[in-house]
Structure formats: structure tokens, C-alpha cells
Image (spheres, helix red, strand yellow):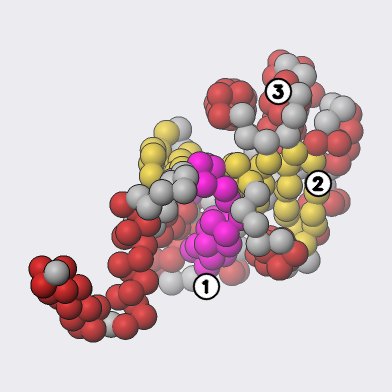
Amino acid sequence: MKIEQVHRRLSGIPHMSEQQAETMTEFILREKPKSIIELGFFHGVSTCYMAAALDELSEGKITTIDLESARKREPNIENLLSELGLRERVDVYYEPTSYLWRLMKLIEDDPTPRYDLCYLDGAHSWNTDGFAFYLVDRLLKPGGWIIFDDIDWSYEKSPALKDTVRVQKMPPDERSALQVRKIYELLVKPHPAYSDFSVKDGWAYAKKINNGDTLQPTEVRQEIIYQKERYGLGAYLKDVVKGIRRKFQK
């Protein structure tokens, strides 16, 4: 299915713009992910565009998760997918509280990494999406990508949320913080298993390193971090010194 056909049906429905849809379509046609997980779908516009791109490739499936309230939206995701002939490409999950619980179930059912792409456009909060990143990491294949939407979104700039009681009760710095960007800068970019960082047009990209079967510098960094955390820096350094001495005594 061509993107122009999807544009005509989805015109005026929030939240993915036509420019974003074209960017996502180009990305999927280039990277050819066979399995996508999406956190947050609202009406399902982004899901439809991604499913259409997979349909053009003639393969691939999407797992998409949002709140139970999304079921009652007009139009809702299932209606749109069905109208476009894309329903078979998507498994839709509605959750009472958060996609975090569904991610837990996915890991519990099968911890094997199985997704090539994660598109995260959900809570936009440090609390939820910071943890979601670590859960997604368990499910993302080496070589897979994660894309964060609304990298510069904040509660105080949100027309829908800024005047709500919940947001008004937040500390000022929490209201004004670019929380998705903080997740990207403080959790994703320092993570030793990710590279290829870029930010463009409100999206932040990161690629999970594909090390194959050989020990790469990133894995060495991960082992160093593990050893430091497990034994403490002092004990770790003593072990390093002992190892060096043994090497030169041979």
C-alpha cells in the first residue's frame, strides 16, 4: 500500500504529521524491520503508516500498546487498520494502567529479543518512559533501532495537559523539564549497548549495537561496569593489578 492512499484516509486525524509519516516510511523501507513494537498509538495513525510501509515490503508485524481508553476513540485504531486493509499486520493491546505491564508480560512469556524497531510515543514522562526504555532494551534485537517522539515536549507546553490539576501540582522544574530528552541524554546515550545517536525534526534515534559472536569494546565496557558494581571499584582495581602481575610473571 502506498503512503498516498494512507494520507487520504488519515488526513486531519492526530497525531503523526504527513512529514513524520514520510520520514517513518523512508526509514522502514530502508532498514526493513520485520518486527516493530510501538508504545502509545492514540487513534492509530502512526500504526497505520508503519503497517503500510511493512505492507509495501510484503512482510513484517507490529505490536502496539496503549491505554484501554484508546479503544473508545473515534475513529479507533482497529477501524482505521481494517478500512486500510492492514489489520492483519498489527497486534493491538489495550492496558488498564500502562504499557509497562504489557512489556513485563512480553518479557515473562519470552525474554528472547525479537523486535527490530521500537517507536516510543507514549507517556513522555521520566517515570514511565525511562523504565520503558530498559524493558524495551530486553526485547530489542542487536542491530535494532529505538525512536523517541516529542524529544522536546514538556508538561507546561502541552495544550491538553498544562492546566490539569495533576500538572499544576507538579514542582515547576518537573513541569518545565524536557523529560523525553532527559531519558535520551541521561539513560540512552550513556548506555554501552547503543550508538548511532541523532536528533532530527523532534525525533531522537539510537541503534542497539550488533556485536555478532565476537567480544567488542562495548562488551568489555559492560563487563567493567558489571565488575565495578558487583565488587566495588577498589576490589576491581586490585583484581586488575593482580592480573597484570600474573601476565608479566609468565
Residue carrying label 2: 91
The span picked out in magenta is 124-153
**Above or below 10: residue 73:** below
Mark 1 lies on residue: 169
SS for callout 3: helix
Q: Is residue 215 above or below residue 135?
A: above
Distance from label 2 to label 1 (Cα)? 36 Å
**Label total for image:** 3
Q: Where is residue 122 in the image (x, y as percent from the top left)?
A: 62, 53
Tell me if residue 41 comes above or below residue 24 in the rendering. Answer: below
Report which residue position mark 3 lands on. 57
- Going from N to C along the chain, the mark reached first, 3 or 2, is 3
x and y percentages locating residue 85 in the rendered image = 87, 27
Which quadrant would residue 97 be assigned to in this image?
bottom right
Say whether disc 3 or disc 1 marks the residue closer to the N-terminus.
3
Q: Does the magenta stretch include residue 144?
A: yes
What amino acid is at disc 2? Asp
On the question of residue 210 being in view, the answer is: yes
Given residues 38 and 236, the one toward you in this image is: 236
Give the percent coordinates (x, y) of residue 207.
46, 43
